[in-house]
Image: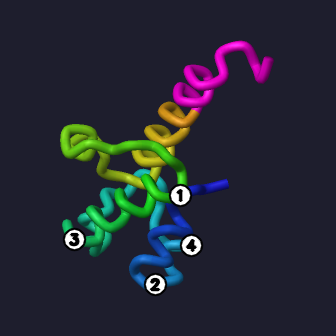
Amino acid sequence: MSVIRPMLVELTGITEYADGVGDDVDLTASGIDSGDLVRLVLLIEQRTGVEITAEDMEGLATIADYEAFVAGRGAAGRSAADPVGGA
């Protein structure tokens, strides 16, 4: 299930992001502006606890990019915070 897509729908108010924009489509080419991207990053950080730096943002262009980044950082954060599985 997508973590990013519902946030884009919330930010833009455009429900087409739930169905119409492919995971590998560049978000700026789909009509998302830089202000929306900054708001998206802030929302991701709030909701997931994953920090995204300006340098990280340079490599994030698609929904798939953001999903992979959050999944990778989220898993890394959990293993660092809980290295022995909750013991």
Give coordinates of residue 41: x percent, y percent.
35, 57
Q: Which residues are magenta?
A: 75-87
Q: Which residue is mark 1?
A: 47
Which residue: 32% across, 67% down? 39
What amino acid is at disc 3?
Answer: Gly
What amino acid is at disc 2?
Answer: Ile
| Disc marking residue 5 | none
Q: Earlier in the sequence, mark 2 or mark 3?
A: 2
Number of numbered labels in the structure image: 4
Q: Which residue is mark 4?
A: 18
Please tell me which residue lies in front, 5 or 45.
Answer: 45
Whether residue 39 is situated above or below residue 47 in the rendered picture: below
| Disc marking residue 35 | 3
Give coordinates of residue 29: x percent, y percent.
25, 66
Q: Earlier in the sequence, mark 4 or mark 3?
A: 4
Q: Residues within 10 Å of mark 2 (few under 14, many from 20)?
A: few
What amino acid is at disc 1?
Answer: Arg
The CA distance from mark 2 to mark 1 is 20 Å
Which residue is situated farthest in the front direction here?
87
Give coordinates of residue 81: x percent, y percent.
59, 25
Q: Quadrant of residue 54?
A: top left
Badge nearest the viewer, 2 or 1? 1
Q: Residues within 10 Å of mark 1 (few under 14, many from 20)?
A: few
What amino acid is at disc 4?
Answer: Ala
Q: Residues within 10 Å of mark 3 (few under 14, many from 20)?
A: few
Q: Which residue is mark 2?
A: 14
68 on left or right of 85: left
